[in-house]
Image (cartoon, rainbow, N blue to C red):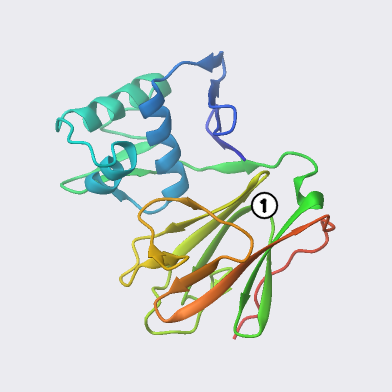
Amino acid sequence: MRMRFGDWSFDPESRQLVGAAGTVHVSPKAFELLGALLRARPRALTKNEIKDFLWPDVAVAATNLPALVNELRAVLGDDARRPSYIRTVNRYGYVFCGDVTQERRGRTARTLSCRILYDRREVALEPGEHILGRSHETAVFVDSKAVSRRHARITVREDGAELEDLGSKNGTFLRGERIARPTPLRDGDDIALGSAHLTFRVLRGASSTDTGRAPRK
C-alpha cells in the first residue's frame, strides 16, 4: 500500500520514492529505514530496534544510522532542527512526525478479506492499519491487564498482511515466537498478546462490504 506525506509517495512494493519532480534514488538501507519509520508511526523507534531491523546479527559502526537519517533528510528536504518528517528523539531514536495518508489499489478489498477471531468475535480487517490493544479506541479490543493499550498493529496490504509489536510490555507472539520486527501473517496464525490468543484468518473472494470493527464494550 502506497503512503503519501507532503509531496512524497512511498511505495514499498515497487520500492519507489516519488516526489514532485519524479522518482528519486535513495540507498536500499535508507529506503528500508523510511519504511520502518512510516509503519511504526506515531511510535518512536529506538536506535537498537532500527539496528536490529536494518542490520540483524551484524555489528556496524555507530555512525551508520545517523548517516542514513541524514541521507533521507537531504532527499526529503527535511530540517533536523525543524523537522517535517523525521524527528530525532534525544538519547532514544527517531520518529516519523509528518501526516501520512494511504492509497488503496483498486480491487484488493474485493478479493482479499482478513479477519481476527477473538473471544467469540470476528473482526473484519480492511486494507490499512489496525491497532490491537486494551484501549477502547483500538480496532481489536483485548480486555486483559497483560495487554498494553496499543499493543500491536496489523497492516493489511494487497498481497497479504503483517504483524508488528508496538513496544508492548509483555511482547507480541506469532506462532509461539516473540516478534521483534514486522512479520508476515498466514491464514490460521495464532497471535498471542500477553495471555490473550487471537486467530488470524484470510478469506479469498470476499466482497468489499465485508468490513467492520469490533463492538465497543
Residue at coordinates 38% horizontally, 84% vertically from top-left? Answer: 145
Residue at 40 percent across and 24 percent down: it is 28
Front-most of residues 147 and 73: 147
Q: Residues within 10 Å of mark 1 (few under 14, many from 20)?
A: many
Q: Which residue is mark 1?
A: 127
| Residue 175 spot, x, y in % from top left | 47, 65
Q: Is residue 31 above or below residue 51?
A: above
Q: How many marks?
A: 1
Query: Residue 61 at x, y = what percent?
Result: 15, 30
Left or right: residue 161 compared with residue 86? right
**Whole-percent x and y of residue 168?**
35, 67
**Is residue 136 visible to the viewer in this orientation of the structure?**
no
Q: The residue under label 1 is which amino acid type?
A: Pro
Residue 122 against residue 35 in the figure, above or below: below
Q: Quadrant of the N terminus?
A: top right
Which residue sits at x=34%, y=61%? Answer: 167
